[in-house]
Image (cartoon, rainbow, N blue to C red):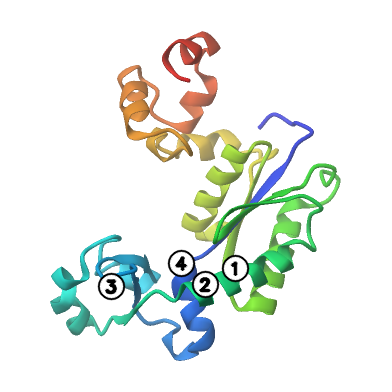
Amino acid sequence: MKETNKVFALVDCNNFYVSCERVFNPALNGKPVAVLSNNDGCAVALSEEAKQYIPMAAPIFECMDIVRKHKVHIFSSNYTLYADMSQRVKAVLSQFSPEIENYSIDESFLSLEGFQNIDLTGYGRRIREAVLRCTGIPTCVGIGPTKTLAKIANKLAKKNKMCRGVLDLSNHPRGNDFLASVDIGDVWVVGWQYAKLLKWHGINSALDLRDAPDGFIRKHMT
């Protein structure tokens, strides 16, 4: 990847609502868990164990046979708890960067500009370890020269076990290979309509999008 002065880390809490429930009930670790929406209608958070049984956003009443068969633990949303845990996580993150953008309840961008002379992958591991030690919440860390690349790195860090929860795309020797593995529809802010248009023009991956002519992008996208 091309070097730039800017570096961002996206720290994303894993299955956040489920992880919050597990902090206060460790017996749930390793078991299928689902957290429901406001009216207990749909599954809005699933543990990795539950994802093999219940689709995200599925109406829970349609899944009750599966829930009973696989002993899925079901919880109503507890937004007071989740907001409190989010603040605890972000308090830890504030120790690692002077500039933080809290993107959502479970995601934060950290500016790592000026940190290029240190091992950023190692720094990401320190962030993960500190958050887990202080809050009990597992995270993944994606690092890149733009927020979009940090988002992609985070997604890949979740999927690829060899990353051990951290991937730095700011100057990775296999950066192109990683980008080629990301479907264009999975790139942050590329909606399904743009994804369809881009694929029609042979732009199928994040790497294809990066290498697309500027003129084409200006003509066809905002």
Identify the element where label 1 is drawn: helix
The amino acid sitting under disc 2 is Tyr
The answer to whether the residues at label 2 and label 1 have Cβ atoms under 8 Å apart is yes
Instruction: Tell me the residue that label 4 is attached to.
Output: 15
In three-dimensional space, the C-alpha distance between marks 2 and 3, rounded to whole angstroms, equals 16 Å
Mark carried by residue 209: none
Instruction: Tell me the residue that label 1 is attached to.
Output: 86
> In the figure, residue 65 lies in which quadrant?
bottom left
The answer to whether the residues at label 4 and label 1 have Cβ atoms under 8 Å apart is no
Sequence-first disc among 3 and 1: 3
The amino acid sitting under disc 1 is Ser
Label 3 crowd bin: few (<14), some (14–19), many (20+), radius 10 Å: some
The amino acid sitting under disc 4 is Asn
The amino acid sitting under disc 3 is Asp
In three-dimensional space, the C-alpha distance between marks 2 and 1, rounded to whole angstroms, equals 6 Å
Identify the element where label 2 is drawn: helix
Q: Residue shown at 57%/38% (left/top)?
A: 148
